[in-house]
Image: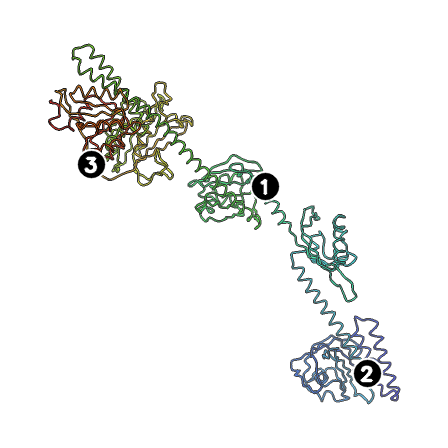
Amino acid sequence: MATASSTGSAGDRAQDWHQVITAVIEATAVAPDLFFERLSQALAEAVGASTCFVTECDLGPVKAGDKPNLSGVEARTLSFWHRGRHIDNMVYPVAKTPCEHVFRDGSLCYGQGIQQLFPEDADLVDLGVESYAAAPMIDTRGNVIGHLAILDERPFQDGDINLAILRLLATVAAAELSKRRAARLAAERERLLRQIIDLLPHPVFAKDEEGRFWLANHAAAKGLGTTRDRLLGNRDEDFLSAELVERFRAEDAEVLRSGDRLNVDEIEYLDNHGERQWVSTSKVPIDIDSTGRRAVLGVAINVTDQVRAERRLRSLVEATAATFGHDFFSSLVARLSEMLGVRWALVGEVDDDRIRCLALSANGELAEPLHFDFQGTPCAEVIATGAQFEVRQAVGQRYRHLPGASELGTESYLGTPLISADGEVGGILAILHDRPKVISAQDRSLVELFAARASAELRRQRAENRQRELQSQVLFVQKLESLGVLAGGIAHDFNNLLATILGNVGLALMQVKESDELRLYLQEIELAAERSAELTRQMLAYSGKGLESKSQPVDIAVIVDEMVELLRSSVSKKARLRFELAESLPAIDADPVQIRQLVLNLITNAAEALQGQSGDVTLRALVTDPPDGLLETGTQNPLRGRCVCLEVEDTGCGIDDETRQRLFDPFYSTKRSGRGLGMATVHGVVRKHRAAIEIDSVVGQGTRMAVWFPSTESEAETASREPTQHEQGECRTGTILVVDDEASVRRTAAKILQHRGYRVVEAADGLEALHVFKRRRDIDIVLLDLTMPELDGFETLAELRKLESDIKVILCSGYSSRDATSIDVDGFLAKPYRPAELLNMIDPLLPEHLRPVV
């Protein structure tokens, strides 16, 4: 090996080391990327050594006297020159090698016997070296980061190795390694930064002062319709419109000038596909490097979905806010199907096991609403769970009962419940499409929002319909009440006239012989008056003020069984009467005579609805609960509890709306010969029994009338008084006070009593009656009318009781006896009455010595 020591003196060797440094510097300057390769080669050739290598190792700072534990520490060669060529780099453990002493003690030189000094270092044997010299590479912070080593196959002579120069070259190598490490660290940090910003779904970019993109992530490039490699180094005008370029340049200049953050909301632009997009951007100034170069760093958030959702929401609100009822639902489904891009949208109301469609949009147009059973359809899932339910594909195959699912090729479905006021599912909002479709979270929320609005509208409509029904019922009750008052007033006045007629005819008949021809005329007059009295009784029954017998427990089935033959004979032979009577019906508290009248009128009316054609009339009697909201006729009280329902159903012509409104009006009839009192009488009986009537009719298909009577299990006894018949007899001395404001009625009653032989005192009103009663103490009975001016019958009675508590009083009226039964009187006489009825009421109340002799 040729060394410096063999070629000259010490001064020459110093000059040789100067040449070494020069050769090394020149070699490494030629190719900076090959710095360590040129360093190891140039140094080996300059000193005439067979081997030279540079390593990298992270030990941290090592101070004098420290004994660092190097067990497990490895060194990595950065370049390795050996016998005139570079060999592959390697990694080796530094323990028990000369390198261990370099890292621990600093620069050193072993002139010979290196293999014997480190027998466990096999690499020294493989290299065939004898001598070793090295210096540690230390960075500016004092950390040992590697070493520079020279090895030769012959021993070093004095002056061959200058450790000071070797340390100098090791320092240069440490600087280069630190530089490369810093570059690697910067590159790694940049790579990590790019990975981070590329993971962001929002565009991130940085532009220098010239407007060139210096940094950008994939989202930024995609938003501009390009790649990141194409974007970097280019400007906005290469990708955007002139209008946006001018706006962005102004914003960037303002950020660089002010040094403050700039927030820009909802920038609108067209992407490279022509789609309208909206972004919100934040921009801040940053320093690119230490030279003072600046850039604008921006982060943009794509708010296109949010803007579109808001605009769709605003459009839907504008379209539906001012609409109600059918218009609201129609507008809702039309807008939903348009904005969500689906073929069908419907909103429906749950009606038992069916969906009653309120509005349907099909293929962009409003279609005829349909009604369908929801069992076996996806709507059943929504109704059962009360939650949104989605089927993304194959709806037609999975739910074949969904109307048109297979025929129309329905693929996807989204149903949302409409919640009613009681928290139940009252309806459904559904969208369907003919292709598999995934509804976004925003669109699902939009559907839920408008399902809530539809729920509120459906609740409003139901409340409004219920209010309208209640108002209609109240108006109907008021109308019937008014008609009842009118009918009752007419009947009362007519009764007074008939009382006079019947009374005088009765008196005349008492004085006419059986053989007298005049008797026949009087009897015809009496018969006509009795028929007129029957009309007034029907009018009073309608008004609820008709004559009453005391109610008793009544079995409707028994009454109907007794009337079967009568009913069959009362209707046309073409009317097929059917009877469906439940067994063991509970009793109702009723007047059997009036129940018979009600049954007869309902059956007759139903048979006449057949209009001479063949048809069915069915009478049913069953026990059940009344429908919700059914009110007692004549009141606003709901009918509750178990009821006996009497139904009469026909297959006749049905009832139109106009007829239905006037069905119970007295004297209203659709028949030429009808008197219009049949259904009015039915209504009066129903009202008097605090029952309810329900009518269900379809024109051309028939009518069902149902009367609901409150049931009772009581077995109250009903007392009935059988009047005894009295013939004319001798006059007695009993005194009767007749009180009535109708002079003709008063005079007729007086004539009948006087003809019987009683003494009679008359009074035209209550005040006069009290005056007469105070003046005369011989009055035995008071025949007292209920309806009078000044003091009515009840008020007059109260005053009479004060004057004489046990005075016998008979109340007399053309109205009902209901009110009279609640007070202590000795009898009630209904107008018009025959002379015998009046006498049969008076005679039993008098003492034996005042009664006429039979």
Quarter occupied by the C terminus = top left
- At x 15% / y 28%, what residue is drawn? 846
x%, y% of residue 99?
Answer: 72, 83
Whether residue 613 sits left or right of residue 145 in the image: it is left
Relative to the observer, which residue lies in front, 666 or 816?
816
Dot label at residue 801: none
Please tell me how crowded label 2 is: few (under 14), some (14-19), or many (20+) other residues with Cα within 10 Å: some
Of the image marks 3 and 2, the number of the one nearer the N terminus:
2
Secondary structure of the residue carrying tag 3 is loop
Instruction: Please identify the quarter of the rendering in which residue 725 is found.
Output: top left
Query: What amino acid type should be assigned to the residue bearing mark 1?
Result: Glu
Q: Amino acid at mark 2?
A: Ile
Q: Quick one: SS at disc 1?
A: helix
Marks 3 and 2, how far apart at CA: 140 Å
Residue that carries the numbered disc 2 in the rendered image: 165
The residue tagged 3 is: 717
Amino acid type of disc 3?
Answer: Glu
Q: Quadrant of residue 569?
A: top left
Distance from Cα at disc 3 to Cα at disc 1: 70 Å
507 left or right of 704? left
Question: Which label sits in the foreground, 3 or 2?
Answer: 3
Q: Are marks 3 and 1 in contact (CB under 8 Å)?
A: no
Relative vertical location of residue 666 with respect to residue 459 in this rendering, above or below? above
Q: Position of residue 639 (x, y in %)?
A: 34, 38
Left or right, residue 343 beside residue 648: right
Please give the residue where the numbered disc 1 appears in the rendered image.
318
Q: How many other residues sit within 10 Å of disc 1, few (<14), some (14-19) or many (≥20)?
A: few
